[in-house]
Amino acid sequence: MGIKALFQALNIISKKIHLRKFKGKTIAIDGYVLLYKHAFKSAREILVEKSSKTLVKNCMEFIDLLVGFGITPFVVFDGASLPMKLETQSKRTKTRLESFKKAQEFEKEGNMKEANRFYQRSVRIRSNNAHDLLVALKKKNIQVLVAPYEADPQLAWLSMNGHVDAVLSVDSDLIVLGVKTFIHRWDSKGNAEQIDRKDIWTIMPYVKDLATKKVSFIENQKENEKGNEKEKEKEQKPEKEGNEKEKGKEKEKEKEQVKEQEQETKKAKNITVPFDFRGWKEEKFLRMCVLSGCDFLSNIRGIGIQRAFQFTNSAESMSQVFELIEQDNRFLIPNGYIERFKLSLLTFLHQKVFDIVNKKLVPLRPYNPEISWDQEIENSEKDFSFLGPDIENEILIKISIGEFDPHTNKPFPEQNVINTTNENENVMNQTNENGNEKEKEEEKEKEKEKDTQMEIEKTDIDQEKEESKENN
């Protein structure tokens, strides 16, 4: 998900925080990331029993946690599938189908431990699951928004335009898209990590000192901190020299500082290339990220983020990057790669989002052939069909508030709007009334398993057909 190994490159500026620091602020949350994070606990229930009950309950517990910290959550959901991502989605669907078949086999054998493991691998969140959560959020007056296409650029637009103070997700694409304050690696207690986009341009090379086993960048940071701490200690030092308790506290502080420094050093040791983004422009950083591999374009074999950095750092334009790669006999640029590279850049820059103020479809950034990144991409025809078709404004607004399914542009079925999470309880009540519980449950279980398998096989194909019709 996202840019391969980007978090590794930015590890040194990822700060440990607690979500309480955002008290009184608004945090935008990727709705599908939230759903997938909690889906593994109820994978079989989602796939076989077609229920979102446990899933929604677990997601709402996290939302309640944020509200308890004084945070205003703003949950954004994915809309329709992005044509540029169909290849990636097709691969994921194939993997899920294989896992689902294995899960069924293990369940028939009575091995529920292995069955649940493979159900977790095959779980897929659909529009109805997301809609169940959306309904629950609305009942608690939590702000929600369904993006016209991907949630990532919509979240970036909210951040770039000052509608939210931070974005919470696991997808590194958001940093590339333009999110100013990015929160990731959170847990159920509110511990998390924060990356500020402005800090990227201050990252310096990390030179390892083999004698002291320290990293110079961290060492300089720590020296400033130690200076401030010594001043505080002088002010707070007790008059009595022989105060053993105070000495004990000072030793504990020193131990904590050593541990903290060791952790930061380990963090930096994971990075084997001196990433130095000082003086870089936005377009250069974007080039490096796409070259290292993303959801829209696989990387050239042998080129990961480290080599992508080296090639990009040595070139001033996209064409120069590919000249350097062609001169290196170790790498082969696949046919059509450069054209696909250009489309990927355009996708990151100009994806379609919903303007929540003017209530209309807009690009994340306006296309402008006068600026450098649009100049070098040379999209003179202004053909953006690969970003999905335009959507009628009336339908767009209905999608944004969760009344229309973004995949069909039609209203959600009535039972979804009311509550689909009670379906399981109703089935159980019926079997209790009619008797022969075991036989009826087994029959329904088999039917549901068949239906689920057919859905996994057909849903993506149907969606691709529908999107191709819209494009023609």
Image (tube, grey):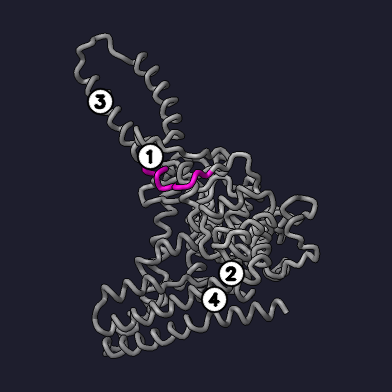
Magenta residues, start to end: 264-275
Looking at the image, is 49 positioned above or below residue 355?
below
> CA separation, marks 2 and 4?
30 Å
Residue drawn 65% across the image and 47% down it: 282
Q: CA distance from mark 2 to mark 3?
A: 55 Å
- Mark 1 to mark 2: distance in Å? 37 Å
Report the side of 174 relative to 109 (left or right): right
Instruction: Say which element carries label 1.
Output: helix
Q: Which residue is mark 1?
A: 265
Residue at which label 2 appears:
85
* Residue 138 in sight here: no
User: What is the number of the mark on residue 251?
Assistant: 3
The C terminus lies in which quarter of the figure? bottom right
| Label 2 with label 4: CB-CB less than 8 Å | no
The residue where tag 4 is placed is 414
Choose the circle earlier in sequence order: 1 or 2.
Answer: 2
